[in-house]
Amino acid sequence: MKKISKKTWIIFAVVIIVVVGVIAALSSQAKISAADTFQTAKIERGNLTATVGATGTVRSNQSALLNWQTSGTVEQVSVAVGDRVGKGLTLASLESTSLSQGVILAQADLVSAEKSLDDLLQSGTAAAQAQIDLRRAADVLEKAQDYRDSLDEPYEFDQIVYITVNGRRVPSLKKVKVDEADDVTKAEADESLALAQAQYNDALRAWERVADGPNKADVAAAQARVDAAQATLDTAYLIAPFEGTVTDISILAGDQVSAGAPGFRLDDFSRLLVDVELSEIDINSVVLGQAVSLSFDAILDQEYAGKVVEVGQVGSEVQGAVNFEVTVELTNADELVRPGMTAAVNIVVKEIKDTILIPNRAVRLVDGKRVVYLLKDGFPEMVEIRLGASADAMSVLASSALEEGDLVILNPPSSFEMGGGPPPGMER
């Protein structure tokens, strides 16, 4: 071989140094470029709150539209919008002179029915009187029976006659003996006995009805008559069926109304509820008593608390999807929350504390497996993972080679996902 000169070795060494420098510079530049290109987040410990979300409309615990049941002229309106009223309070009434004959006559029917009911309920007094009447009827029957029996046997009776004593007429008793009464006397006695027997039977039935207190069937019938008369009278009034707040009034004093005409709307604001529809996928994770957070477009920068109070047992199909109704109660509602408002509802279905969390944005699906890309020494590195419970932004890292403090890439290029590795030119 031809001997290489010293000068040539020097040139060759310089070239090698330059090439190595260029490669190092390119590698460093690639690292800087990768660091600038990717968004990263540290893997940290924290608490995970898994929720199920839906939207619904606020409603009051109870709501009623009060309509007139008869026609007439409004006499007075006793409340205003916003008034809180108790159950049974009369909100408005009709003039008595404008009512139909049937409503007016119901007043007399009510008085009569209430008296009959009161008589039945006064069982002690009725029983005592019935016992007295029964005893008297028994005495009359016994005497009538004894008299009738005596007519079939011979009997004697004293007859007054007048005799002359010392020239004067004076009365005297004479014993008269009769073998048997005549047929006319017996017939009259039979009639008296039959009447006494009928009166006794009536008294006995009256006593039996009240002996053990008022007859339940009689009381029920009397109460039904009272209720029917009262219901007819009540058509002349609009009465609050429950405690609540007057939220709408459709009448004024002097208005002519007919059956079915609207009068008031009444709402019970003691509880505010939201009904939401959840898919069959989520329904089994929801149970009574779970905590709920609610927000409203109409109430900015404020979050309300609630709880699940009812979970639907039967689903309904809408356009091929099966949904279940869940009812949520607000537990800290204020005057800003009103029925009809749209609420965003998030039901807390699981809470996990002090666990390793990973951002959902970093998770990708590669060849059917869940993976994330770590940024190590300026280059992406794919790592397979297994997830536990998930929320909107984070998931529990159930198993992987990741550690706290590792940087995961939030925006890996799509070529990472397709090929299962770093893009060309970025191999290590």
Image: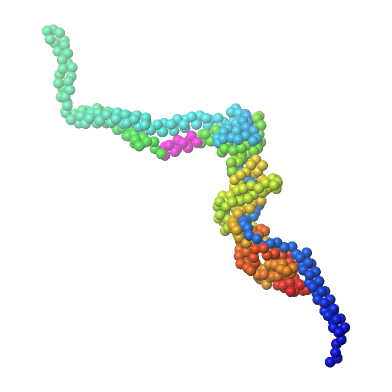
Q: Residue 54 is drawn in which quadrant? A: bottom right
- Location of residue 156 in the rendering, given as x and y in whole percent from the top left corner: 16, 24
Q: Residue at coordinates 59% horizontally, 51% vertically from top-left?
A: 291
Where residue 48 sits, quadrant-wise, is bottom right
Q: Is residue 207 above or below residue 56?
A: above
- Residue extending furthest toward the bottom: 1
Report the predominant secondary structure element of the magenta stretch: helix
Which quadrant of the rendered structure holds the N terminus?
bottom right
Verify whether residue 420 appears in magenta.
Answer: no
Q: Residue 200 appears at what percent x and percent y?
A: 31, 32
Please provide the residue range marked out in magenta.
217-227
For the residue pair 130 and 293, the one nearer the viewer reads as 293
Position of the C terminus, as image quadrant, is bottom right
Tag count in the figure? 0
Residue lying at the far top in this picture: please name it. Answer: 167
Give whichever of 199, 264 is nearer the camera.
Answer: 264
Does residue 416 appear left or right of residue 110 in this picture? right
Q: Is residue 101 visible?
A: yes
Give the residue drawn at x 82%, y 77%. 17
Q: Which residue is located at x 68 percent, y 65 percent?
A: 406
Classify 93 as above or below 285. Answer: above
Q: Position of residue 93 (x, y in %)?
A: 60, 31
When the figure is inspected, residue 395 is found, relative to residue 183, above or below; the finding is: below
